[in-house]
Image (spheres, rainbow, N blue to C red):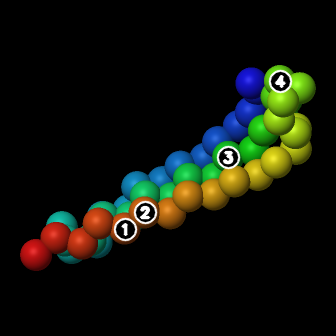
Amino acid sequence: MIGVSLSADVIIRQRMFMSLVLAHALDRPSDFGAGRTIGYAGVDLRF
């Protein structure tokens, strides 16, 4: 699989942690379609 991805980790006041990922597939095996973009966002809040 060939693709590109961009990710960022954001920390707000040492309590809230955010992870953001955006990935785009340029070329995949025949079982998957090329040209797909997926995103992921995660949040972790600590008290």
- Determine whether the residue tagged by mark 2 lies in a helix, strand or loop: strand
| Image location of residue 15, percent across then percent down | 19, 71
Write down the quadrant of residue 47 in the picture. bottom left
Residue 42's x, y, as percent?
43, 63
Q: Total number of numbered labels? A: 4
Q: What is the x, y in percent for residue 27?
A: 85, 29
Alpha carbons under labels 1 and 4: distance apart: 32 Å
The residue that disc 4 covers is 29
6 with respect to 32 (left or right):
left
Q: Which residue is mark 3?
A: 23
Q: Give the class, few, some or many, for how many residues have Cα within 10 Å of label 4's Cα (few <14, many ≥20).
A: few
Give the residue type at disc 4. Pro
The span from disc 1 to disc 2 (Cα, nearest Å) is 4 Å
Under mark 2, the amino acid is Gly
Element type where label 3 sits in the image? strand
Instruction: Give the side of residue 6 with respect to residue 44, left or right.
Output: right
Q: Please state which of the two labelled residues, at mark 2 or mark 4, is closer to the viewer.
A: 4
Q: Residue furthest front?
A: 31
9 left or right, relative to 36 = left
State which quadrant residue 45 falls in: bottom left
User: Measured from the top left, where is residue 9 in percent x and y?
Assistant: 40, 55
- Name which residue lies at 82% across and 48% down: 36
Badge 2, how many Cα within 10 Å: few under 14, some, many 20+? few
Q: At 63% across and 57% down in the image, what residue appears?
A: 39
Are the two marked residues, 1 and 4, in contact with CB atoms closer than 8 angstroms? no
Task: Give yes or no for contact between labels 1 and 2 (Cβ–Cβ under 8 Å).
Answer: yes
Give the labeled residue for mark 1.
Answer: 43
The three-letter code of the residue at mark 1 reads Val
